[in-house]
Amino acid sequence: MRTRFFRLAAAALPLFALLLALPATRLAAQVSLLPPEPVKIAAGPLGNWTLSGVVSYSGLASPQLFPGEANGGVLTNGLALIQKTSGKWQFFVLAGPYAFPALGARRLTTLQYTQILGAVPEAYAEYVFNAHLSIEAGKLPTLIGQESTFSYLNYNLQRGLIWNDMENMVSRGAQLNLSYGKVTVNLQYGDGFYSGHFGAPSAAVTYAFNPKNSFIFATLLPNRITPPNGSFADANAQLYDFMYSYTGKSWSWTPYLIFLNSPATPNNGYTAAARGLGYALLGGYRFNPHWLLGFRAEYAAGNGSPAAASPNQNLFGFGAGSKAATLTLTPTWQDQDLFARAEVSYARAFDYVPGMVFGVNGNNPNELRGAAEIGVYF
């Protein structure tokens, strides 16, 4: 199984190199919903603040539900964002209910999603020394991956399989930001997968070739004895993420390749190491200010075998050693504050354990989902 895993990793590298080699005229970065003009608040000696928000509701349906799951809808965003982006002291607060349905995963209620990170999922204070140096502390967004926790910031309504099963979302801690010329460095120290156990350094290095093209390497290195938590089962997982972004007038492309290693830790019940590989291509094409077509293709694989599996090797919920691929298309319409989008997605599991995939008996390796969302972004 280990040999097969490294063969998959070797096969992924040429594909990733090909994506990076595509000519810039064909590439572009994340172009999600166009942000509104925020409400400006004059807070006197506390400076100038801004306030914005998003409210949206989505419905999802599939003929291949997980056992005990039902079709239905959730409040995907009920968020208010207040921030200060000028002066030496700045801050960012995002508060309210939310949901992050993901491909290949059982859907929860809005309350269940919100309980994972709390009613204030992101909030931090920042001190800006100068144009090149700042430091921030609080509940910080991850440095890993190309998708946000919150749907209104993404190409797609649902998050991807890789986002759900191989990445962290928020970390409580502190972050140092350095920038000079074409290079930006972010150094974070916190609790990794929102584990409550501090000692997880994370870093991202960005090189901007020009205003449109950039390459990012990011890593997260939690303590190997970090126990599982409600945010992530394998909270001791080390991540190594290679990302590329291009931002153009119409096209956007953000391919990335991520490696995961969850070390064997008997204290956590992990009798063997878990390794995962994922690569994805996200993109979008903006026809005009009203219409955007977002898309995502991804493939992910894990090691291990069902016969002698360690719990951390069940990365995707389909059994140890399973693999999966997904495809997603998301047309989006926006007219100033109003937006609506539809979505069709397909997920396919490979080398799965019977009873752990889709359908009423958990034996269907395929899931086709339809989704729709309507909302106000103000």
Image (cartoon, grey):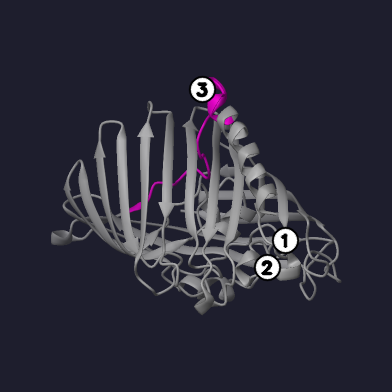
Q: CA distance from mark 3 to mark 1?
A: 36 Å
8 or 157, which is in the foreground? Answer: 8
54 or 198, which is in the foreground? Answer: 198
Residue that numbered label 2 is attached to: 107
Q: CA distance from mark 1 to mark 2?
A: 9 Å
Residue drawn at x 85%, y 65% is 363
Residue 143 seen in the current view: no
Residue that numbered label 1 is attached to: 60
Q: CA distance from mark 3 to mark 2?
A: 37 Å
Question: Which quarter of the picture shows residue 298?
Answer: top right
Residue that numbered label 3 is attached to: 24
Span shown in magenta: 19-39
Query: Judging from the image, what secondary structure is the residue with disc 3 in?
Result: helix
Quadrant location of the N terminus in the rendered image = bottom right
In the picture shown, does residue 107 fall above or below 245?
below
Q: Amino acid at mark 2?
A: Arg
| Circle 1 residues within 10 Å: few <14, some 14–19, many ≥20 | many
